[in-house]
Amino acid sequence: MEFEVRSGGTIRIDLEKCESCETKACVKMCNAPGMGEILELKDGVPALKYSLEEVKRGACTEDLGCELECELHGNRALVITLPLPELEEYLENLCEKPTYLREE
C-alpha cells in the first residue's frame, strides 16, 4: 500500500511483511493520543481509515511515529519519504560533503 501525504511525500507499507507482524506497532502508534489516527487494522494488516484524498489533504500529520515504531518494534514494513528541497540545496553548497556521501 502506498499513499501521498500533504507535503508531497509518500508513505509505503509492505502489507506482506505486516501479515507476520506480531506487534502491529505502526497502528498502535498512529492511534496514540495526539497522533494522526489514520491507520486501523483490517484483516490483520494496516488500512487507511480515510480516503486517499482526505489523507493527502492533511489527515496524516506526518509525525513519523509509525515509521519509527515499525522499525523498532515491528517488521520494518513502513517507509516514509518526504521532500526536503532545502536540505538538498544545503548539502550541495557545503564546502565538504557529509560523511555519508564521501567516497573512501
Image: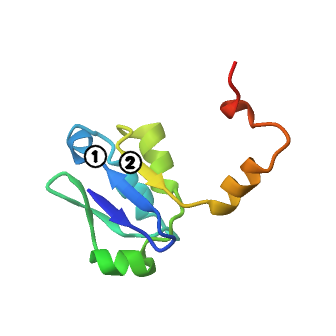
Left of 89 or right of it: where is 37?
A: left
Quadrant into which the C terminus falls: top right
* Residue reaching furthest to the right: 95
Q: In the picture, residue 70 is in which quadrant?
A: top left
SS category of the residue bearing label 2: strand
Location of residue 38 with respect to 13 vertically, above or below: below
Residue type at numbered disc 1: Asp
CA gap between label 2 and label 1 equals 6 Å
Task: From the viewer's side, name the closer residue of 76 and 27.
Answer: 76
SS category of the residue bearing label 1: loop
Q: Residue at x 76, y 37 (%)?
A: 97
Labelled disc at residue 78? 2
Q: Residue at x 14, y 55 (%)?
A: 43
Task: List x then y, in percent, for residue 89.
Answer: 71, 56
Q: In the picture, residue 56 is in which quadrant?
A: bottom left
Q: Is there CB contact under 8 Å for labels 2 and 1? A: yes
Task: List x then y, in percent, for residue 66.
Answer: 45, 54
Colour pattern of the rendering: rainbow
Task: From the viewer's side, name the closer residue of 23 and 3.
Answer: 3
Residue type at numbered disc 2: Leu
Task: List x then y, in percent, for residue 9.
Answer: 47, 63
Q: Residue at x 36, y 69 (%)?
A: 38
Labelled disc at residue 14? 1
Q: In the picture, residue 83 is in which quadrant?
A: bottom right
